[in-house]
Amino acid sequence: MSYKPFDLTGKVALVTGGNRGIGLGMAEAMAQAGADIVIWGTNAERNIEAEGKLLQYGVRVLAQTVDVSDEHAVVQGMNEAVEAMGTVHSVFANAGVGYRSNSFIEMTTETYRKTLAVNLDGVFWTFREACKHMVARAKAGDPGGSIVGIASLAAISGPARNQAYAATKGGVVSMMKSVAVEHARYGIRANAILPGWIATDMTAASQGNQVFTDKVISRVPSRRWGQPEDFGGIAVYLTSDASSYHSGDSFLIDGAYAIF
């Protein structure tokens, strides 16, 4: 029998913020590997577009309109996903926002709170509800599961004028480690992915800025912006049984920018 560690047939993967950008890039790769997909997003029209893309891979797809900054919506969304799909094997807490300020001292409390609501509160509720399901499944005799938090290079670097964002992403890494330790006994693993400079809607303004391209992207050893599809491989790995003993880790995907 051939070794097929990355065959995701029979797996169900849920991706928050899964209707575009990195989230959709991960969802498409997992669907191509055979996983059924659940995507959460706040824009119903984009959800429908993403659903159409994913269905072409011949897998089951559930698109839900869920705002992760709303605790009730997360609880209800997870319950509905499990009911509709039968189970959920991996959950990628990818939904995020970024609000830069002219300077730290000008950053408003409103900006800080809005950032935390999605990037940290939303991850907390998503992780918690996913773990509830996976622990219950393990106690019923079906252990295993993968919890993944999408953090950022900002979690370990010092992004000026972006302190609120950096704080949330650092929090995701710490939360992931705690989840990994507590839930390993149930076969549940938890890891984080830290993207570098990736061409998504969040970085649209920088992509069109020649000064930014010259000063920053030229310093990326890979000599290009990262693309959403660059996260497909790690998503497939973390959902697959190949990563069954890999937990508590942070995957920096930045074209070697951080070490240059």
Image: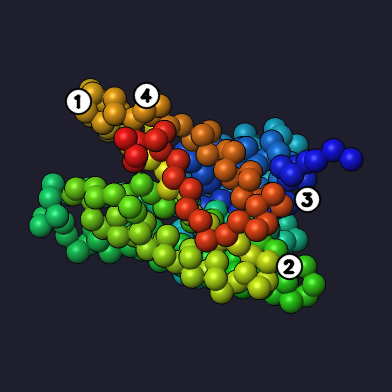
- What kind of residue is marked 4? Arg
The residue at which mark 3 appears reads as 10
- Measuring from the top left, give residue 247's x and y in whole percent: 57, 59
- Measuring from the top left, give residue 87's x and y in whole percent: 72, 61
Task: Please say if the residues under marks 4 and 3 sit with CB atoms less than 8 Å apart.
Answer: no
Rendered position, 85 above or below 73: above
Residue at x 29% of width, y 49% of height = 157
Alpha-carbon distance for marks 4 and 1?
15 Å
- What kind of residue is marked 3? Gly
The residue at which mark 1 appears reads as 211
Badge 2 or badge 1: first in the primary sequence: 2
Alpha-carbon distance for marks 2 and 1?
50 Å
Q: Secondary structure at mark 3?
A: loop
What quarter of the picture does the C terminus occupy?
A: top left
- Measuring from the top left, give residue 78's x and y in whole percent: 60, 64
Task: Please say if the residues under marks 2 and 1 sit with CB atoms less than 8 Å apart.
Answer: no
Q: Pointer 3: residues within 10 angstroms few (<14), some, or many (20+)?
A: few
Q: Pointer 2: residues within 10 angstroms few (<14), some, or many (20+)?
A: some
